[in-house]
Image (cartoon, rainbow, N blue to C red):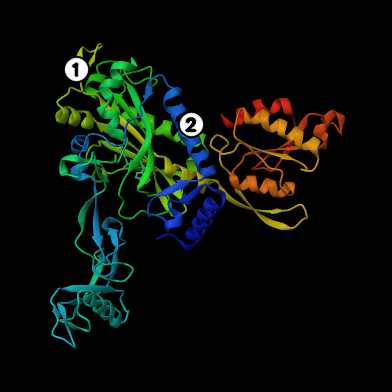
Amino acid sequence: MAEPKANEHMEKIVSLCKRRGFVFQSSEIYGGINGFWDYGPLGAELKRNVKDFWWRSMTQKREDVVGLEATIIMHPKIWEASGHTSTFSDPMVDCLLTKKRFRSDQIDPQSGTVYFYSGAKDSTSEKVSSEAYSVLIGNGKHPDHARKIARQFYTTRGVANPELLGERTELIEGTVRYNPGNGSLFTEPRPFNLMFKTYVGPVESEDNVAYLRPETAQAIFVQFKNVLDVARQKLPFGICQIGKAFRNEINPRNFTFRSREFEQMELEFFIKPDETASKSSFPGEPGTEPSWGWEQWHKYWVEERVKWYESIGLSRDVLDFHWQQKSELAHYAKATVDILYKFPFGTQELEGIAARGDYDLTQHQKFSGKSMAVFDEETKERFIPHVIEPSAGVDRLILALICNAYTEEETTDEKGLKETRIVMKLHPRVAPVKVGIFPLLKNKPELVKKAQEVRDLLRAEMPVFYDDAGAIGRRYRRQDEAGTPFGVTIDFDTLGETPDLKDTVTLRDRDSMQQQRMAIGDLVPFLLSKIR
Ligand code: GAP
């Protein structure tokens, strides 16, 4: 259970996201739609920066990874081959009283006294319900609470004035069969497939069923041979993709953390099977040594991904790792490491790095009848490659970056009064706006003209925000909340009032609030060195 303090912290973050235009509830004017979120002007920029930087790091800056952009709806056989049609489900229960739906594996175990009833009869009519029902209440709680809930339940079954039948009690420990909110019995858990279904073409028949992809990975596996043919790559090499994925989550929660529509950034890195790889020398430097075994490649990718998170401001002390136990592993995985972030509501998964063996390519070979084997010139052998998969959620990462950036600081304003400064300490690489541009006064045409020149100079290279409204301190605060790492102020010295300072501006650093004087001509190289 999250601490009240954590809730309060999340509420402030959610409120800032709406107030400043990072994240809005989808379809808000119609009351919203659970599990769907939109990104406002600042959020859209932040998300784009994160995806672009991932793409640059994962493919453009590497020799051994190429990109793919596949469709969201694909042949339904793909999901049979991958196992999603039969196994991609969560256990679902309904509260028998309120009909509210829960994931049974997310219910906290409870202890107390269970009140069992064999049925109820109506005290004013002949109506009887012989449906068994039970209610759990905490030890020491008054039994009338259980009876009240049970009467409400039988009322929903058409017994208007229920007299409860066959009451008996039992002490119980660590059960997940009752709704923690009201004590009512749940239905038996049943699997609920998380894939969104649709129909392709005008006829809504079983033959035309298709699914919105629940992960981007499968498109990479089914296009593996096409990419291999055109990309002039030899194993080991990877194919990466960024795109939407859809899961009809039973309980979307924790703001954008668990959504029904989200984006993934996935890499499928194809390697030789160990028995082939071990025929030549290993290990050595990645990329230069094609013959690493899967465990080395797995560790290599975990380390690469952690370094990547560090490079956008998530240091190792806000991350954590979970090496999945055998019993937790997905059906396709030999090993999985989850990279976790310490969210205010708990330490939770950002990215999973799975060693998927040859499961997926073998399945697609079986279901499509097309060979997925490659021929290795070095060993003169044919084999189906194995896969290491770093799979990250874009939206979860955006939430982690926002939570990590949100800072409240006590400061003093220009009049010497204490105030709380809210500042989003986003890494300059991902910050939506890179620099705020402020003419000291807006009613001095020379200042405004110069400030607009500086704006145009910088705008050619990076997103900027021009603001001439209100006191300079307030303008700084507005940009602090937006996460803008730098502020440039154009003042009378810029115009030459102090001759030595002509054509210089003050450059303010968001986090330290330190200001330095810098020549306009030095701004672009300085700022580019910070944001790239
Ligand atoms: N191809 C492997 C795969 O999809 P996953 O662990 O189910 O593995 C990978 O998902 C990542 O996608 C997660 O680590 C998480 O960041 C993100 N993700 C999964 N389900 C999500 C959801 N409902 N909402 C937001 N992000 C989600």
Residue 116 on image: x %, y %: 19, 76
Image quarter in which the N terminus is found: bottom left
- Quadrant in the picture for residue 508: top right
- Say if 328 sits above or below 499 in the image: below
- Say if 221 sits above or below 28 in the image: above
Residue 62 on image: x %, y %: 43, 22
Image quarter in which the C terminus is found: top right
Q: Tell which of 354 and 507 is nearer to you.
A: 507
Please give the residue where the numbered disc 2 appears in the rendered image.
53
Q: Is disc 2 placed on a helix, strand or loop?
A: helix
Which numbered disc flags the more N-terminal residue, 1 or 2?
2
Please give the residue where the numbered disc 1 appears in the rendered image.
382
Q: Is disc 1 placed on a helix, strand or loop?
A: strand
Cα separation, mark 1 vs mark 2, equals: 36 Å
Residue 361 on image: x %, y %: 22, 28
Q: Tell which of 425 and 101 is nearer to you.
A: 101
Please tell me in which quarter of the rendered image ligand 1 is found: top left
- What numbered label is drawn on residue 29? none
